[in-house]
Image: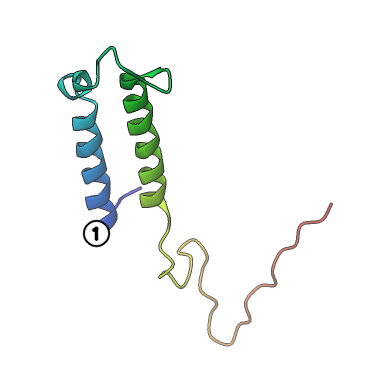
Amino acid sequence: MIRTGRKKEWSVLLFVVFLVALLPPVIMIFDSPRRLFGIPIIFLYLFTVWGAAIALTALGAKRSKTRETDSSSPEPLSGESPPPPMHETR
């Protein structure tokens, strides 16, 4: 898939931000013997970054609602009625 415009910028921004967030010097900032709710801080940091990466990637991958037609479906010719909707039968 070729990304254009803001989606391409968003993809590059996410890649750079999470690449920096997962560099060893940044991770080592959270490597301490302290615990929060009984969980080591470094684990909380890693799982938070991981979850944020998934959530923001999903947000960026959503299709915009400004598209009026799907590019995979052909436009009906003038004077031609569109095909009837397909219904699933069981």
The residue at the far top in this view is 33
- Foreground pick, 39 / 56: 39
Please, is residue 44 above or below residue 69 in the view?
A: above
Residue at mark 1: 5
Judge from the rendering whether residue 60 lies leftward or rightward of residue 10; answer left or right.
right
Q: Position of residue 1 (x, y in %)?
A: 36, 47
Judge from the rendering whether residue 27 lies leftward or rightward of residue 58; answer left or right.
left
Q: Residue at x 53, y 85 (%)?
A: 78
Identified by mark 1, the residue type is Gly
Judge from the rendering whether residue 29 lies leftward or rightward of residue 59; answer left or right.
left
- Foreground pick, 25 / 36: 36
- Asked which quadrant contains residue 63, the reply is bottom left
- Foreground pick, 27 / 65: 27
Q: Position of residue 58 (x, y in %)?
A: 41, 46
Judge from the rendering whether residue 3 lies leftward or rightward of residue 51; answer left or right.
left
- Asked which quadrant contains residue 38, the reply is top left
Q: Residue at x 33, y 25 (%)?
A: 46
Q: How is the image coloured?
A: rainbow
